[in-house]
Amino acid sequence: MALEIFSRYELKYLIPYHVYQQIVPHLLERMRYDKFGDQGRYNIISLYFDSKDKKIYYETRNKLRFRQKLRLRIYDDAGLEDAAFLEVKQKYNNVVNKRRTKIKLKDAYHFLDTQSLQHKHQYDVSNPQILNEVHAFRNLYELDPKIIVSYDRQAFHGLYEDDLRVTFDYNLMCRDDNLAVETGPLGRNFVANDLVIMEVKVTHSVPLWLTRLLSELECEKKSVSKFCTSIDLAENKRKEPFHLKEKVFI
């Protein structure tokens, strides 16, 4: 069963695709492919929510010490009868907390459309308490569906450090004209095609061997918000995908 509640540090890097290809053989000396997908590869499609006055966007853009997001996420080519995840992702003092519940996609849509807990007993949901939290968060912020973000991911899990995960996201696209996640990974690239977002996810500290490897390959920590960057592109605040040469990272 997929983990529903966890807390960890997430360190982000923006790297060229060829560096990603260099890193993988080194990772496989101390890590294994994630158990999901072929060699840890799978597609992620997320529907993000925001308020009319863009509370979520500005919390992220302004790097508030406490900020949170609501999203509906599916993996690969999931349809209405397949599993989806409603997630509340929070960040406080650089620690990421995620709470999510598994629910059939068609039930997630019904729950979100009715904006009510009246029918929650009819849903096959893995964690009813988190469904309550999603409902409370959405009502507090007055959230509505805003944008879809999709990308391909390759994930690795530590062999000797059980809390260590490293993920690589590429083919990063967004759209705001069709908010049905089951339509698939369609849209405009909001990060240049020759770049990869790498994330190191760990409960305590990054192991020394990985710190040395990233230093040797000159991987510099640069955090690009998938949500904010895609919103900027959709609203024409950006004219082109994010490039490595840019000096401002959000």
Image (cartoon, rainbow, N blue to C red):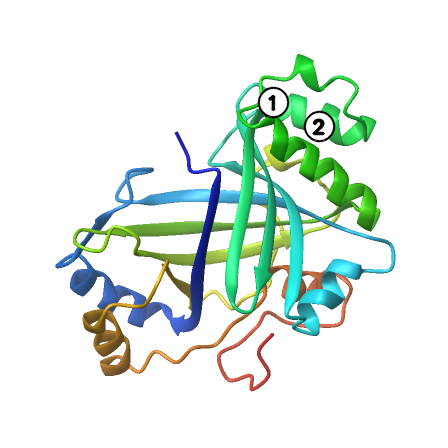
| Residue furthest right in the image | 52
Circles 2 and 1: CB distance less than 8 Å?
Answer: yes
Q: Looking at the figure, which quarter contains the N terminus? A: top left
Q: Is residue 65 left or right of residue 206?
A: right
User: Disc 2 marks which residue?
Assistant: 109
Residue 19, relative to residue 31: is it above or below? below
Q: Is residue 22 left or right of residue 175?
A: left
Q: Is residue 52 left or right of residue 146?
A: right
Q: Position of residue 194 (x, y in %)?
A: 43, 68
Q: Nearer the viewer, residue 178 or 30?
A: 30
User: Disc 1 marks which residue?
Assistant: 80
Q: Which mark is residue 190?
A: none
Of badges 2 and 1, the one in the foreground is 2
Residue 232 can be seen in this image: no
Q: Position of residue 211 (x, y in %)?
A: 26, 75
The disc labelled 2 sits on which kind of residue? Tyr
